[in-house]
Amino acid sequence: MTLTPPRSLDDLGPDFDADDLPSNDTAATSLSEIVASRLSRRRVLAGGMAVAAGFLTTSLVDPSPAAAAPGSGGGGRGAKGGPLLGFTAVPPSTADDVTVAPGYRTTPLIPWGTAILGSFPAFAPGTPGEQRPDGSVVTTGNTAAQQAEQVGMNHDGITYFPLADGRRGNEHGLLVLNHEYTEEGYLHTGGFIKDHKPATAEAVRKSQNAHGVSVVEIRKGGDGQWAPVRSGRNRRITANTPMALSGPAAGHPLLRTQADPSGRASKGTINNCGNGETLWGTYLTCEENFNQYFRVEGTHTKENADLQKRYGVGGDSFGWAAHDPRFVVTPQDPNEPNRFGWIVEIDPFDPRSTPVKRTALGRLKHEDASMVISRGGRVVVYMGDDQVFEHAYKFVSADNWKSMRARGRSPLDEGTLFVAKFDDDGTGRWIALAHGQNGLTAANGFPDQATVLINARQAATFVGATPMDRPEWTAVDERTGTVYLTLTNNSGRKLVDDPTTPYDDRPNAANPRVNNRNGQVIRWDERGGDHTATAFDWDLFVLAGSGTGADGSTVDPANAFGSPDGLWVDPDGRAWIQTDGSQPIACNNQMLAADTATGGDRPEIRRFLVGVKECEVTGVATTPDRRTMFINLQHPGENGGSTWPRLDGLTVPRSATVVVTKDDGGVIGS
């Protein structure tokens, strides 16, 4: 394929994230232009064009009196018959403290640097021997080896696994959480230094040890406070932990390196963003922006160069390549980046187990993985690829998951990967990314299934999948089966096709706004209620923004939000929406709850919690009784403006898990 360089940041607007430059190389038009005068939450069944205040809206028409939008209905009710959103919304906040709804309280837990293993070293910011920009040398702080015994940095996706049945399981469990990346200045010097890179091999190892996943046993004490337990179950998984590659791509030449000629023994996991859990009790961690850790050197074959470009490989943002040759991509050893971008399965109950990268789920910038069981006992995993103009996916196992496991086979190693096509009439279809189908043949550059999966992005755009506005977290409403997907933003969409770009950047029904700075939440119902179906019906649940009408948003101004990211639908039907990005009002990033059953054009949404300065609110888990919630605040003070959580007399900002409880002991959100 002919590749066109991505546009510059100047072309994409002031709110565009450098990590989200488009790399989609499709030349195909994914959807026809649509015209409309308003946006509704009913099915999109007709279209037209109208431009008002710089955004495109969609006219949605329902041709059948019996038809209903996915998940539609009256206002929701809680488990005991009360209103689904039983709390008072909090106002916007720009304070350097957590704000939560009245009747709730929050407590920080396991911040970066909490000792959980080995010698249990006390937290001390800084890396001995690291050089500051002024030339001075750091003399105190934790070593790389000590960081490997501590909770990592920049908490993200999170799951709670109870260690007992009944009440005891609500008070004792394993908290498993991701560590997406590192703030190198805080990590190595204890202070904010923009774009700092480690100056020594020791500092690089420490940065690598602050990545990955933490498994932490926690227990609720008699005083009602949660605390980590010194336990043999505790574990750190880092950028250097041995891993296995499994599934159709394992052993393929594109996964072989000089250090691993088998192509089956990977090393480490990085940029772990969202997460999921399986029906059989394991944890799924998702590798997202893996591309930025590598430095590319030399002249590569067209095949390798195209593959690197499609995933944006290069840049060496963390400076690892200077001290770790594994992150230098050369023509003689080009495949290390191909061993990242996978979903990794971890057994949290066995600290001796080897994490497994499941290649059947495709190589993407994985945001999260939501698993459900469908007809015939097959498992389905929904996934987003977090970059502008990328796609939404699902994986369907080949057989009943219990039967497969009984035969010693993983349900995540055999099955079909699909990509979504959202049509502008409110219907959609799943297109199989299977070798030999839909043009995915050797003649078109896909000689086998392994190549399809390693090149999942190219395969998806080749078959005509819909380019989306940064597909992020997925969530499934277990009551109705409706699937929700957050789309964070995309400032790159334009009203007319841009001939200088190789992808269709016009608005479409599923992504209806130009210069989309605030994002949206989309949802769909699989045809016939079957998650293995290849057809679905969709609508737009909410368009984020100020709620004033000038930006096309469908939110109430009092609870305005932008850049939806983290997402979870609880068993009562509350959709918990977390934000990561500039807000359309003066407010730190926040967490809101939406009533998924609310009728009308504006779903009922209330602001539940506001994070501290310069943080992202991300990841959500609860105890089985849902009376304790765990969320993460990532990168507080990423621009030097926070001192949270201010523990042990320290003012260096530290990512941490936040424990949320209700004063009356009730279900969170009720």
Image (cartoon, rainbow, N blue to C red):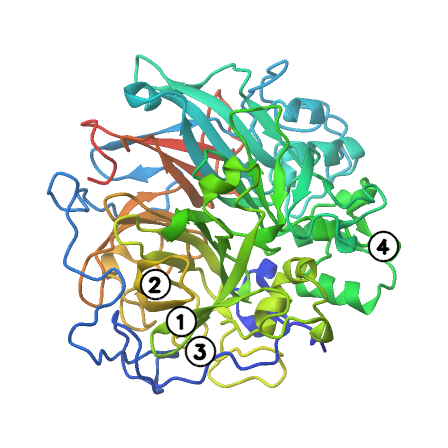
Residue carrying label 3:
507
Query: Does label 1 or label 4 sit earlier along the sequence?
Result: 4
Marks 2 and 1, Cα distance to the nearest angstrom? 9 Å
Q: Quadrant of residue 307?
A: bottom right
277 up-or-down from 529: above or below? above
Name the residue: 67% across, 54% down.
Answer: 291
Query: Does label 1 or label 3 sit earlier along the sequence?
Result: 1
Residue carrying label 4:
330
Query: Does label 3 or label 2 sit earlier along the sequence?
Result: 3
- Local secondary structure at mark 4: loop
Does residue 510 appear in this view?
Answer: no
Q: Quadrant of residue 560?
A: bottom left
Query: Does label 4 or label 2 sit earlier along the sequence?
Result: 4
Badge number at residue 348: none
Marks 1 and 3, Cα distance to the nearest angstrom? 17 Å
- Local secondary structure at mark 3: loop
Mark 3 closeness class: few <14, some 14–19, many ≥20 residues within 10 Å = many
Badge number at residue 428: 1
- What kind of residue is marked 1? Gly
Comparing labels 1 and 3, the label whose residue is closer to the camera: 1
Badge number at residue 524: 2
The answer to the question of whether label 1 and label 4 lie on touching residues, with beta carbons closer than 8 A, is no
